Image (cartoon, grey):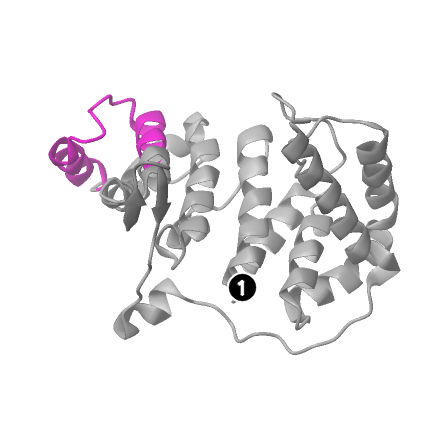
Amino acid sequence: NVTASTFESTVTFDVVDASDAAKRMPFYAPPQGRFADPGGLLSGWRSYSALCADMRRRGDTSNERPACSSFYCPWVASNDATRKFDGKFRSEVPGHYGALLAVLGGDFDPGNREAAAYLLAYSTSAKTVSEIMIKALQDPDREVRAAALTVLADMSGYRSNVFIEAFRIMPALDYPTVSDRSKALAVLAGLASRPEYQSYIISRASPQLVRLLRSLDPGLRDLAYTVLGMASGKNYDRKDIAAWEAWSAGASSGSAKPK
């Protein structure tokens, strides 16, 4: 990491040893398929995404999760334009679900796959959406993985009745980009707020979470510390790595499973 303290910015260079590639980069080969835009929904999502980005730049954000028809809602203020897009996706995505799945799994363009992931969150089945997003974590493009983890983070934090297979999220804590790791931590933060997951996270994820406390990236350190505190109830200083390691050594010897 290289940190420019004047501007409080951090640049991270990730290196993956060849011997660790299969574990840290369990991605399938880049897809080569070419698909038509199902009902114009991919271009519609891009327009919606651009609108939301522009609203964020203007400060038109929301302090609370806005209402929308998807398992993922962009955190922008609701207005006529956002509601129009939301209504379009709610009514049209179900009729193109199979085609969107084909795009997500096989389109050569990562941008199309990313848009398809967000659109597929417009479903009435939380279980289906969760499974689709977890499978997308093996996409070779980090933006597609980011989309899947973003949807899962929204579900873990705001859909307390949705079961998410935490053990399938945990490998992303060691994926090769800061985006992968930070968004995986965001998913676990949502799960750590739910009592039925806390003992499982403590017993299975605490060693990796403690390792992330050593990260030179402040965002990763802060998120790892947040998840550890939420799951464990401990308040060791974030810089007291020895205390966290000693606690983790005992905690991770358990074999709890989420209920």
Residue 190 is situated, as x and y percent measured from the top left of the image, at: 48, 32
Tell whether 200 sits left or right of 17. right
Seen in the picture, residue 43 relative to 52 is either above or below; the reply is below
Of 88 and 132, the residue lying toward us? 88
Residue shown at 26%/45% (left/top)?
Answer: 215
Residue shown at 58%/57% (left/top)?
Answer: 144
User: Which residue in the structure is indicated by mark 1?
Assistant: 141
Tell whether 63 sits left or right of 176. right
Residue 71 is situated, as x and y percent measured from the top left of the image, at: 67, 39
Of 117 and 176, the residue lying toward us? 176
Residue 135 quadrant: bottom right
Find the magenta span and give its range: 224-252
Predominant SS along the magenta part: helix
Seen in the picture, residue 172 relative to 195 is either above or below; the reply is below
What quarter of the picture does the C terminus occupy? top left
Circle 1: residue type: Asp
Magenta run includes residue 240: yes
Seen in the picture, residue 195 relative to 53 is either above or below; the reply is above
Mark 1 secondary-structure assignment: loop
